[in-house]
Amino acid sequence: MDHEKKENGAGARITRKTVYMAIAIVIVAGLGLGAFLGLFDGLTEIFEDEDIIATVNGEVITEEEFNQALEQEKMQYMQQGIDLDSDEMSEMLPELEEQVLETYFIIPILLEQKAEEEGIEVSDEEVEGRYQEYAAQFGGEAQLEEAMENAGITRDDLIEDISRELSIQNYLEYYLESYLADNPEERIDQDNIELSEEEVENRYQQMREEYAQLKELLEEDDPDVPTEQVKMYLEQIEDKYGYLLDEDNFEEIKPQLEEELRQDKAVQKKQEKEQRILMAHIQELQEESDIEINL
């Protein structure tokens, strides 16, 4: 990730058009920092007769693209069996509109602007790597290209969207690094994670129960049981813990479990801490920015 300042300023004016694909713009989750909502953006020209729903530091969000994103969100509710025509959902519509405007548009725009301001760059290798990740999720490049064709999206559109996504991710990484360098007391130290005896004992008993259940599944010879997967998982457990799950060997396994629990709790606390830092930063950006909303 290159944090060198760019020589060029902002490029030509572009709007944000939601690309309807089963790919989310993951601001935090892919970094192990928590999850964040949003969709990719394509490029489109601004037409003078388009109604403007909002502006973010001068960057416009048109009614057409907002409605497209809102319909996309409504479809997700419908797929979950939620009746959008019910009185309850009708009352929630203004809240849903605000949520879509903020998470699909305002926050990503603010973060892109900060990435541009800080000179955050994205390498060709990063873009290609992410493209291949998406191709793998669709079962290969041919399937991804078919999905893009059905959605009316070109490869160049997707590459541009990936660049924007990575630009936001890289900026958030950069911001976290800078923030924690200035506030080292907020770093999570695994050695300072406290554990109770009960926590460790509960983990051990859960592992023993799971181990016993896996062995029972193999002994039952049930055709509905995925035998190969169960056997593979059982072997992984045995390779890691050996005989320590057959008998009550808590004291012997205790140091290993304590280390694993500390690691797990440290990761969880780190994610929670970093998410709070990022959300506070995003709120600060919103408060400092010139945002006009015409909903």
Image (tube, grey):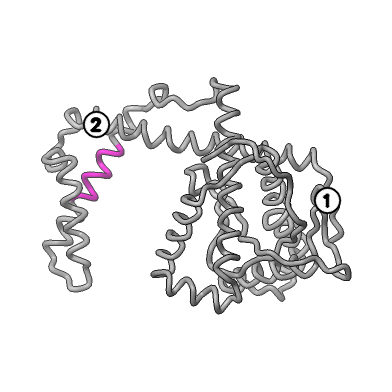
Amino acid at the residue labelled 1: Gly
Q: CA distance from mark 2 to mark 1?
A: 56 Å
Q: Residues within 10 Å of mark 1 (few under 14, many from 20)?
A: few
Q: Is residue 127 left or right of residue 217?
A: right
Outermost residue on the front side: it is 7
86 within the magenta span: no
Please tell me which residue lies in front, 255 or 167: 167
Q: Secondary structure at mark 2?
A: helix
Which residue corresponds to mark 2?
Answer: 256
Q: Is residue 151 left or right of residue 271?
A: right
User: Which residue is painted at 61% across and 60% down in the image?
Assistant: 39
Which residue corresponds to mark 1?
Answer: 58
Which quadrant would residue 99 be assigned to in this image? bottom right
User: Which residue is painted at 71% across and 61% down in the image?
Assistant: 16
Q: Residues within 10 Å of mark 2 (few under 14, many from 20)?
A: few
User: Which residue is painted at 77% across and 70% down in the image?
Assistant: 64
Instruction: Work out whether 59 lies above or below 245.
Output: below
204 within the magenta span: yes
What is the tally of numbered marks visible in this picture? 2
Please tell me which residue lies in front, 145 or 34: 145
> Over which residues does the magenta segment extend?
202-211
Percent across and percent down for residue 50 are 85, 69
User: Which residue is painted at 73% across and 52% down in the image?
Assistant: 11
Percent across and percent down for residue 122 are 55, 47
